[in-house]
Amino acid sequence: MVTGGRGGFSGIDPQQLWDLIGSITNRTGQSGGGAQPVVGSWLDQSARIGLDTTEPAAIGRHLAWAQGQLPILRQRHHLAVLAGRPYPGGTRHMVQISDAAVDVSSPAETARDAREALHLARTDPGDLSNAQLTRLRALLNRHKNNPLFAENFASTLGASATLTFYTALTAVRQYETEPRDTTGLDPETAARMSQLGDLEQALGATLATASRSDDAATRRWQQDVIALGAEDVGDSPNDVYGFQAMSSLLRHGEYDSGFLGRYGAALLAFERSHITDEHVGLQDQVSRKNVLPWDLTGHRVRLHYGTVDDNGADPLTGFMEALGHNPAASTAFLSAKPHFDYLTRTRIWPADPPTDEATIAGYRALGHALESATMGAAYDASPPQLHRTAATAAVMAAVVSMYGRRAEGTDTARTGVSGAGLLARQTGIGKSLGRMTAAYIDDVDWGLYDTTDGNSIFSRVNGRENQLERARFNGDSLRRFLGTISHDDDAYRTVTNAQQAYTTSALVAHPAGRSAYGEPEFSDAKGAIRIGAELQGIMDRSWADQFTATKVASEQDFNDQLDKRAETQQKIAGLLTAGVFAFAPAPEDGLGATIIPLATDQSKGEMDGRIQQSISNYAESQHRELADVRQGQTARFYDAGRAASLLPVHRFLDDPRYNTWTSEQQSKLSEELHEAQQTGYNAGSLNQQLSGNLPVT
């Protein structure tokens, strides 16, 4: 362990630290062959026969000291596992944690605070003052990363009392003057309501820490939580299922992977077995079909506070957020085809509550879970992380296949919705699909080129162990997928910007050279430009088709958003690991940065400059004169797209290394690179026109 100064960082190898904790526990324990009882016996026997006890007493003090370090060591291990990012020193198995996150309370202080927190949590919420709720929140926040506190609190309070306490505390009717109306609340009640979101975070994070313990009490708590999922844990006219209450708490912290897998399987099994139709009138006519148990008419529950379009009634939303914070759990859960298909295609996620908001919280949370599962890191990790494996790549391939699927059916009946239909229905998921695609832009380009060609510039493993860790996309599905996500403005901007950065890096990695006969050689550069232009052509054609179909955006709105995104993305977050580049996050969405792989790990300064310039020029070229598009005249739109995909060519040709070439050689280089760009752009646009998914309005 490498320790910094006050407020610094500690470099920790989680496995070595875990081994140390196990060694101290086993060798100093009070039973099971530990050293403590042996030393105690030495002291007793030495004292009885009059021997000097100085040395055994010193050994006992050392053992006691080692035992006293266990709470801090366990905290550091807990935080190191959560950190999961490479240590700056370069040792791959080291991670960094903030010393400020470590709870330095003594075991006695921790036990005292746990007793107080338990007393407050066992009190009827109706009898708790606002000051007592504030105190409970402060205690939980202080010790939320402390396994000693968290395990004691969770196992002693128990699953049932935890869920009933939280359900009673958040029951919606106590915070309303009229149904669905909170205006006119007295100051005391309004102040109480304002605390609920923070208390939810503190309690959820504390339970997350507790869930990661491997002792018998924690395993029993996990089992009880799952068993209570199908039970009514509330005291109101509407049932409040344990799944609903617990899922609201799952949003915060990182819960144990095994627990999340078992919890999610039980939740889906219960939901799918309790879908029903609703009936009305004397004729008992069906009014709503396939209604989820949490979406029954008149069933009004609020368990999550602070988000306009998310009341916490749909437990799958909170569960998806939990997966979004645990990449191991999300990858495992979404690798199961029945789970993946149900969540992405079959399930119609309800608005919670019914609202005029543009997005549905459940689809946004589903996107977060998919990001985590494909990128191998929490969707909101800061700094951003990218840990691609064979398993994460398989989930990404499933995403491309699902959202790149064609509509199914006959001339008279549709039996399966297209990927574009899914995206149109799943409002709020587009940003995540764009960020995931950017994270796999090297594999996307490989899929557009030819994944069977192992000698192309796109076939490099690019920071991964081997080719098995790369995503292999079906070319047809991939092209439809790119066309589909172009219907979302955020995804369109994210992916086309990522392509600019990747193509720029590929041209840096593969400059033009000379053959053995002294002739110019630039086939790799031509391939990079052609594929980058093909992606731009696909996405431009699809974006224009969607715009023409909806006619909802304005020229100024689009340009303003483009400027904001480009300005944000020029704030380089830097090379996180070899071959990885990150953009800064868009401040309005609070997410981690868009992160993309590069074709080279060339010096940071040079790459930053080239990519900043490329993105800046790209934004300028992308300004659309959309009046023509609204009239169905798309020529100027495509002119701008072609100009955008030519930018890497211009940057490439400006390289001073080619000044020594003859004018004939320079002309040939320019001509063939322009031809590669034109071929790629036209092919992408034509392919989208002929076989891409049509817009869905």
Image: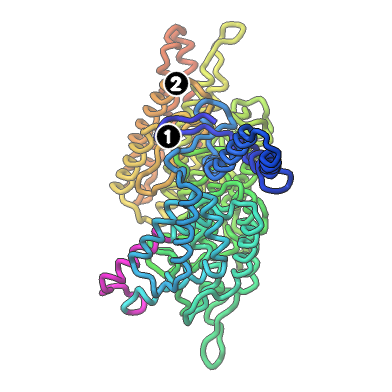
| Numbered circle sitting on residue 486 | none
Rendering coords of residue 632 (x, y %) = 38, 50
Say which residue label 2 marks.
Answer: 652
- Front residue of this view, candidates 97 and 259: 97
The residue lying at 38 percent from left, 24 percent from top is 609
Colour convention: rainbow
Amino acid carrying label 1: it is Arg
Q: Quadrant of the C terminus?
A: bottom left
Amino acid carrying label 2: it is Phe
- Front residue of this view, candidates 299 and 527: 299
Residue 181 within the segment the image draws in magenta:
yes
- Front residue of this view, candidates 424 and 149: 149
344 displayed left or right of 100 = right
Q: Is residue 9 visible?
A: yes
Report crowding for label 2: few under 14, some 14 to 19, many 20 or more residues within 10 A (C-alpha).
some
The residue lying at 60 percent from left, 56 percent from top is 260
Rendering coords of residue 175 (x, y %) = 35, 73
* Among the 4 quarters of the image, the one containing residue 187: bottom left
In this picture, which residue range is highlighted in magenta? 178-199
Report crowding for label 1: few under 14, some 14 to 19, many 20 or more residues within 10 A (C-alpha).
many
Say which residue label 1 marks.
Answer: 642
Q: Mark 2 or 1, which is nearer the eye?
A: 2
Q: Is residue 422 above or below residue 175?
A: above
Residue 611 within the segment the image draws in magenta:
no
Q: Quadrant of the N terminus?
A: top right
CA gap, disc 2 to disc 1? 16 Å
Q: Label 1 near label 2: C-beta < 8 Å?
A: no
Q: Is residue 518 above or below residue 556?
A: above
Rendering coords of residue 102 (x, y %) = 46, 43
